[in-house]
Image (spheres, coloured by chain):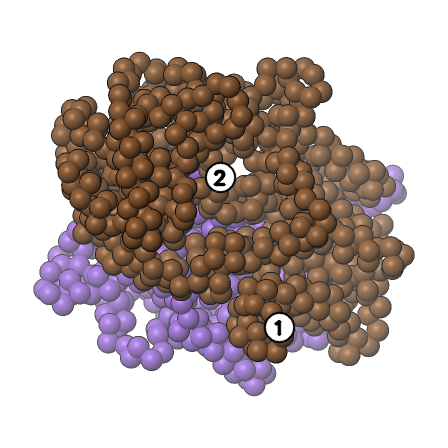
Chain colours: A purple, B brown
C-alpha cells in the first residue's frame, strides 16, 4: 500500500507546485473563502517582519497567530512551501490513523461475530476486508485531491498546519499513545481553542482502548481521566508560557484567543458570524457572541453521551461541527472533515440526502465567487446575496453531518435489532426521525 | 423536515415527480416563456421613481445660454480635426485651458489581436485630452465625468462643442462640490479603456498608455455624450455596459425626469414610449423594447462609451442625440440645459448611487421590471433541469441508484467531459493563434481567418470521436449515458444559474435554447431528427437567430446573405471585445457552454 500512497503524494505535490507557479497563486490568497484573518499568509509575513524589527507582532490588528508556531515558517526553504509539507503530513497521518482504526473495527466485528451478537439478517451489514482495504488510501486521496485543500494550500493558509496538528492528534490517539495525544491536542487547542472539544472523544477512545469502562464509580476511570487531563493541561501550560517567554508579554492572549472568541473582524467569510454581528445592535453583541460560541462547544455533551461507544465517529462529528460553527471558518477546515467521509462508506445505504446535499455544496462553491463579484466588483448585488449562499452552504453542511450521524445510529440500531424490522402486527416497519 | 426524513412522504413525492415528469417540464418551460413575455405588459411592471433623496426633485434653475456658441466651437473643432487628420490635441488643450480648466493629455497605443474590419483599425495610436474643473466648494474628493468621443469623419463634433461650452459655463458657477472632468476620448472605447485604467492605476488587458498627470476625486457618475447634428428630435439613453452590467436605475430616472421637465423627447433602445398599453400594438411595442434590451445586455458588449465605467463601480450612461424626420426639434441650448440640470443633481449626491435597482429590464423609459419579477422566468426554466435530474436519479429503481459503487467507472464519464472541454479550449485559443497560418494558406483576410477558424473548430467538435469510452470500457452501458446525462444536467444548471446572476439576459437566452435539448435528449430518440434539433438549438445557431431577431426588432430587417455577414462580424466583435475590454461572453461560450452542449451531443450518439 505504500506505493499508491507515494504516487498520490507525488501527484498532489505536483498539482500544488504547478498552481504555485501559475497566475492563480496571486489570486487565491485574496479570496475570503480560502483565507481568514486568523490564517492568512500575508498576515503571518507581516507579523514576522514586525518581530524582526523588534516590535511585538501583536501590535496593531494584523497578526493573530500564536508566535512560536510561525517562527519555523520564516526560516523554511521556499522551494517547498511548508503548507505543501503540512498537507502531505496530514494525509499520511490520516492514512495511518484510518488504517489502524479499521483494524480495530474489524477485530471488534470479528469478536462480535464469534460471540454471535449480531442478528442473522444483518450479515449484509458486516464489513469485509475487501471493501475496507482501500479506505485509508481513499481518505488520503479525499484530503489531498480535494479542491478545498488545494485552494487552501495554494493560498499558503496556515489552516493546513492546524489540520496537520489535528491529524497527528488523531493518529496518536488511535495508536493509543496518551501522552502524544494530549500534547497534540494541547497544540491544536493552543492554535485555535476550538479543538478543545476533541478532548472528550480522545479520552473516550483511550479509555476504550485500555478496557476501562466509563463508570463514575470506578477509580481506574478517574485515575486515567485525571492523568490525561493533567497531561493535556500541563502541555497547554507549557506552550502558553513558552509564548510568554518568547515575547515576554501576554499580548498574544487577547490578540489570538480574544480575537477568536470576541470576533472583532467581520470580514465576510463562509461562516455564520460576520453578517449576523455586522447587522446587530451593539448592546446585544456580548449576549449573542456568548450564544454563538457556546453553540460550538455545546454539542460535545449530547454527542459524547450518544456516541460514547464510537469515539472516532465522535471526533469526525466534532471536527465537522467546529468547522461549521467556528468564528472564522475557511474551506481548509471543511476539507479536514470531508477527508473522513470515505471511512464511513459502509453507511452509504442509510444516507438519505447525500445527493441533494452534495449538489447544494457544489452549487454553493460555484456561487461564492459569482456573488462576491457581483457584490464587491460590480456593486450591483449586496451582502445579503452573499450571505444567503453562506447560509445555504452551512445548511447543506449541517444536513450532511446530521445525515451521517443518523446513518451511523441507524446502522448500529440494525446491528442490534436486525435489519428487517417488524411492527408488532408483523408488517414491515420503517424508521422515522421526528 | 418531514420531506427530508419521512420515507413515506418522500416516496409519494418521488412517485409524483417521476410519473408526471415530462408534463411538468413542458408546463414549466411554457410558463417560463409566458412569464417572460408577460413582463412587458404594463400592469405587471412598476413605474420608475427616484429613490435617491439627494436627487429627489428637479428643482434646478437651468440657465445654460450658449448653445449657438457651442455649435460654433464644434465647427471649429471639426475644422481642426480635419486639418490634423485625427484628434486636434493642441487646439483642444489650448481651448480647454482658455476656459479655465486644468488640462492633461494621455497618449496610448494598442495593437489589436487582429484587424477590426467594422471600424477599420489594427494598430491604434491616440491621445485622450481631459480637463478638470476643480470643485470650488468642497475638498475635491469626488468627481463627475462628462465625456464626448472624438470620432472619425463628421460625427460627434457637436458633442465636443457642447462639452466645451458646458465647461466654460460650469467654470463660472460656484455650486460645484465635486470635480468635473471633461474628457474627449479618441478611438471610442479603446481610448476610454486607457483613460479609465490610467485613472485607477490598473491594467487588466495589457494595453500600453502613459500615466495620467492629473486626477480628480473618486468618480461618482459619468455621462457620455454623442451628438452629431445641430438640432435633434429626441435623446436616446443607452444603459447596457460591459458584460451586461447596468448603471443604477436612478441614473435613468434622473435623465427621464429632466427630459420631462425640459420637454425633450426621450427614448430607450430608440423606441418612444406609448400610452396605449391595453392594445396589442402597444404591448408589442413594449415587448420589442424590452427584448432589444435583453439582446443588447446578453451580447455583453458596451453599447456606448460609458460601458467601461461600470466596471469601476461608476454609474454611467450614454446620451445619444437622434435627428429624425419629426417636426418637433430641440436645439443645443436645451440639451445643454438638460445636462446642466443633471450635473447639478449629481453634484448633490452625498453617497454613491445605490438606493435604486441595479438589476432591471425596461419595457419603456418610465417602466421597469426588477430582479424579483424577472428571475422567476429563469427559475421556471432552470427547475426543468433539476426535475430531469430527479427523474434520472429515481428512475423507478429506488434512490440514488446511479451513485452506488456498481455504477460505471469514472473513466467512461471523465473521457467525454475532458474531450469536450479540450475542444472548448481549442475553440477559445486557436482562432487567434492560427490566424497567420490561415492567412498564408487560404485567400482570406486576418479577420475572416479568425472567424472562419472559430466556426470550423465549432463544427469539427461535432465530428469528434466521442465514443472513446468504448476503447477503455468496451460497450457503453445504459447506466453510462444516464450518469453522463446527470453530470451534464447538473453542470448546465449550475452554469446557467451563475450566468443568469451576472447577466440575466444571457442566462435566459441560453436557457431558452439549451434547456429543451438538455431535458429530453437520450440515445434512444430518433437520431437524425434529434441531431437536427440539437444543431438548430446549439449556442452558435442561437447567436445567429439573435442577430436576425435583433435586426428585425430594430426595424432594419436583413436578407439571409447580409445576416450571415453580420453573424460573422458579430463573432469577430465578440472575440475582440474579450481581448480588448475583457468581455466574458466569448470565453463563457467557448470554454463552458459549448463543451456542455457537446456533452449532450455525446449522449445522443452514445452506443
- Label 2 resides on the chain identified as B
B464 on left or right of A28: right
Rate crowding at label 1 as few (under 14), some (14 to 19) or many (20 or more) other CA atoms within 10 Å: few
Q: Does B44 appear above or below B468?
A: above
Q: Is disc 1 placed on a helix, strand or loop?
A: loop
Identify residue for label 2. B240
Identify residue for label 1. B443
Location of the N terminus of chain B (image quadrant): top right
Give percent across and percent down for residue B308: 40, 46
Marks 1 and 2, how far apart at CA: 37 Å
Q: Is disc 2 placed on a helix, strand or loop?
A: loop
Relative depth, front residue between A135 and B310: B310
B111 on left or right of A122: left
Relative depth, front residue between A200 and B15: B15
Mark closest to the chain's N terminus, 1 or 2: 2
Taking the spot 11% from the left edge, 60% from the top edge, the residue there is A55
Give percent across and percent down for residue A32: 39, 52
- Quarter of image, res A122: bottom right
Taking the spot 56% from the left edge, 67% from the top edge, the residue there is B445
- Quarter of image, res B54: top left
Give percent across and percent down for residue A425: 87, 39
Q: Residue furthest left?
A: A54
Q: Nearer the viewer, mark 1 or mark 2?
A: 1
Give percent across and percent down for residue B543: 65, 50
Amino acid at each position: 500500500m505504500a506505493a499508491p500512497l507515494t504516487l498520490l503524494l507525488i501527484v498532489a505535490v505536483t498539482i500544488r507546485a504547478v498552481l504555485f507557479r501559475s497566475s492563480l497563486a496571486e489570486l487565491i490568497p485574496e479570496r475570503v473563502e480560502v483565507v481568514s484573518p486568523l490564517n492568512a499568509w500575508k498576515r503571518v509575513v507581516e507579523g514576522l517582519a514586525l518581530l524582526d524589527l523588534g516590535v511585538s507582532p501583536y501590535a496593531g490588528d494584523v497578526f493573530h497567530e500564536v508566535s512560536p508556531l510561525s517562527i519555523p515558517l520564516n526560516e523554511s526553504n521556499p522551494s517547498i512551501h511548508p503548507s505543501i509539507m503540512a498537507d502531505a503530513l496530514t494525509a499520511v497521518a490520516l492514512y495511518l490513523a484510518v488504517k489502524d482504526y479499521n483494524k480495530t473495527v474489524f477485530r471488534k466485528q470479528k469478536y462480535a461475530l464469534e460471540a454471535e451478537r449480531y442478528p442473522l439478517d444483518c450479515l449484509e451489514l458486516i464489513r469485509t476486508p475487501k471493501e475496507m482495504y482501500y479506505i485509508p488510501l481513499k481518505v488520503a486521496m479525499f484530503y489531498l485531491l480535494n479542491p478545498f485543500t488545494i485552494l487552501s494550500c495554494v493560498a499558503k493558509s496556515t489552516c493546513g498546519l492546524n489540520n496537520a496538528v489535528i491529524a497527528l492528534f488523531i493518529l496518536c490517539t488511535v495508536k493509543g499513545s496518551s501522552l502524544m495525544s494530549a500534547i497534540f491536542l494541547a497544540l491544536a487547542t493552543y492554535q485555535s481553542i476550538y479543538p478543545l472539544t476533541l478532548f472528550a472523544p480522545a479520552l473516550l477512545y483511550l479509555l476504550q482502548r485500555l478496557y476501562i469502562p466509563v463508570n463514575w464509580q470506578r477509580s481506574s476511570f478517574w485515575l486515567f481521566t485525571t492523568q490525561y487531563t493533567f497531561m493535556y493541561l500541563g502541555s497547554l501550560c507549557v506552550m502558553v508560557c513558552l509564548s510568554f517567554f518568547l515575547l515576554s508579554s501576554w499580548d498574544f492572549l487577547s490578540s489570538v484567543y480574544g480575537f477568536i472568541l470576541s470576533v472583532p473582524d467581520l470580514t465576510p467569510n463562509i461562516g455564520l458570524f460576520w453578517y449576523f454581528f455586522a447587522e446587530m445592535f451593539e448592546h446585544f453583541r456580548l449576549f449573542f457572541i456568548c450564544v454563538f460560541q457556546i453553540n460550538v462547544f455545546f454539542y460535545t455533551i449530547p454527542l459524547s453521551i450518544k456516541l460514547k461507544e464510537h469515539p472516532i465517529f465522535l471526533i469526525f462529528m466534532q471536527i465537522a461541527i467546529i468547522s461549521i460553527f467556528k468564528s472564522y471558518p475557511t474551506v481548509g477546515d471543511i476539507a479536514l472533515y470531508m477527508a473522513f467521509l470515505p471511512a464511513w462508506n459502509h453507511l452509504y445505504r442509510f444516507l438519505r440526502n447525500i445527493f441533494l446535499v452534495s449538489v447544494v455544496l457544489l452549487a454553493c462553491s460555484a456561487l461564492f465567487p459569482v456573488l462576491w463579484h457581483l457584490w464587491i466588483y460590480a456593486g450591483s448585488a449586496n451582502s445579503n446575496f452573499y450571505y444567503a449562499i453562506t447560509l445555504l452552504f452551512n445548511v447543506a453542511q449541517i444536513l450532511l453531518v446530521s445525515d451521517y450521524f443518523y446513518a451511523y445510529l441507524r446502522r448500529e440500531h440494525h446491528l442490534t435489532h436486525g435489519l428487517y424490522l417488524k411492527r408488532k402486527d408483523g408488517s414491515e416497519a420503517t424508521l422515522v426521525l421526528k | 423536515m418531514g420531506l427530508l426524513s419521512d420515507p413515506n412522504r418522500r416516496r409519494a413525492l418521488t412517485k409524483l415527480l417521476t410519473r408526471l415528469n415530462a408534463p411538468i417540464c413542458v408546463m414549466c418551460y411554457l410558463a417560463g416563456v409566458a412569464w417572460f413575455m408577460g413582463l412587458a405588459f404594463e400592469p405587471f411592471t412598476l413605474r420608475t421613481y427616484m429613490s435617491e433623496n439627494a436627487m429627489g426633485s428637479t428643482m434646478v434653475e437651468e440657465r445654460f445660454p450658449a448653445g449657438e456658441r457651442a455649435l460654433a466651437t464644434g465647427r471649429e473643432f471639426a475644422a481642426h480635426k480635419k486639418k490634423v487628420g485625427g484628434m486636434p490635441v493642441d487646439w483642444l488643450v489650448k481651448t480647454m485651458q482658455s476656459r479655465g480648466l486644468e488640462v492633461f493629455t494621455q497618449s496610448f497605443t494598442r495593437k489589436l489581436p487582429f484587424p477590426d474590419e467594422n471600424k477599420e483599425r489594427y494598430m491604434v495610436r491616440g491621445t485622450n485630452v481631459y480637463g478638470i474643473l476643480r470643485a470650488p466648494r468642497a475638498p475635491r474628493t469626488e468627481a463627475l465625468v462628462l465625456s464626448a468621443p472624438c470620432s472619425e469623419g463628421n460625427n460627434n463634433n457637436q458633442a465636443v462643442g457642447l462639452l466645451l461650452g458646458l465647461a466654460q459655463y460650469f467654470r463660472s458657477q460656484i455650486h460645484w462640490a465635486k470635480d468635473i472632468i471633461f474628457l474627449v476620448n479618441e478611438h471610442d472605447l479603446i481610448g476610454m479603456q486607457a483613460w479609465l485604467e490610467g485613472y485607477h492605476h490598473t491594467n487588466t488587458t495589457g494595453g500600453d498608455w502613459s500615466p495620467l498627470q492629473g486626477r480628480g476625486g473618486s468618480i461618482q457618475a459619468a455621462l457620455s455624450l454623442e451628438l452629431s447634428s445641430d438640432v435633434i428630435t429626441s435623446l436616446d439613453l443607452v444603459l447596457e455596459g460591459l458584460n451586461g452590467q447596468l448603471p443604477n436605475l436612478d441614473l435613468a430616472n434622473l435623465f427621464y425626469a429632466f427630459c420631462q421637465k425640459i420637454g425633450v423627447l426621450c427614448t430607450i433602445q430608440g423606441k418612444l414610449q406609448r400610452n396605449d398599453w391595453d392594445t396589442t400594438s402597444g404591448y408589442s411595442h413594449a415587448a420589442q423594447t424590452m427584448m432589444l434590451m435583453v439582446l443588447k445586455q446578453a451580447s455583453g458588449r458596451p453599447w456606448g462609451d460609458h460601458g467601461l465605467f461600470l466596471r469601476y463601480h461608476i454609474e454611467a450612461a450614454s446620451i445619444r442625440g437622434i435627428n429624425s424626420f419629426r417636426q418637433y426639434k430641440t436645439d443645443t441650448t436645451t440639451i445643454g440645459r438638460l445636462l446642466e440640470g443633471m450635473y447639478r443633481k449629481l453634484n448633490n449626491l452625498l453617497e454613491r448611487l445605490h438606493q435604486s435597482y441595479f438589476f432591471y429590464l425596461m419595457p419603456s423609459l418610465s417602466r421597469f421590471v426588477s430582479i424579483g419579477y424577472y428571475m422567476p422566468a429563469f427559475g421556471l426554466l432552470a427547475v426543468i433541469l433539476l426535475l430531469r435530474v430527479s427523474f434520472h436519479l429515481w428512475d423507478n429503481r429506488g434512490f440514488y441508484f446511479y451513485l452506488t459503487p456498481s455504477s460505471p467507472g469514472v473513466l467512461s464519464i471523465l473521457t467525454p467531459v475532458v474531450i469536450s472541454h479540450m475542444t472548448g479550449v481549442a475553440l477559445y485559443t486557436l482562432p487567434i493563434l492560427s490566424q497567420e497560418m490561415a492567412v498564408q494558406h487560404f485567400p482570406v483576410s486576418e479577420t475572416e481567418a479568425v472567424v472562419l477558424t472559430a466556426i470550423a473548430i465549432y463544427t469539427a467538435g461535432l465530428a469528434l470521436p466521442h465514443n472513446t469510452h468504448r476503447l477503455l470500457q468496451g460497450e457503453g452501458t445504459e447506466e453510462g449515458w444516464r450518469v453522463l446525462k446527470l453530470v451534464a444536467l447538473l453542470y448546465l444548471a449550475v452554469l446557467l444559474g451563475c450566468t443568469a446572476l451576472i447577466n440575466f439576459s444571457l442566462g435566459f437566452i441560453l436557457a431558452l435554447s439549451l434547456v429543451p435539448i438538455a431535458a429530453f435528449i437520450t440515445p434512444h430518440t430518433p437520431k437524425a431528427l434529434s441531431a437536427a434539433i440539437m444543431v438548430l438549438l446549439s449556442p452558435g445557431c442561437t447567436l445567429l437567430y439573435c442577430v436576425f431577431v435583433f435586426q428585425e426588432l430594430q426595424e432594419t430587417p436583413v436578407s439571409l446573405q447580409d445576416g450571415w455577414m453580420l453573424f460573422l462580424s458579430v463573432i469577430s466583435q465578440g472575440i475582440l471585445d474579450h481581448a480588448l475590454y475583457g468581455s466574458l461572453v466569448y470565453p463563457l461560450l467557448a470554454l463552458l457552454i459549448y463543451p456542455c452542449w457537446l456533452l449532450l451531443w455525446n449522449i445522443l450518439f452514445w452506443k
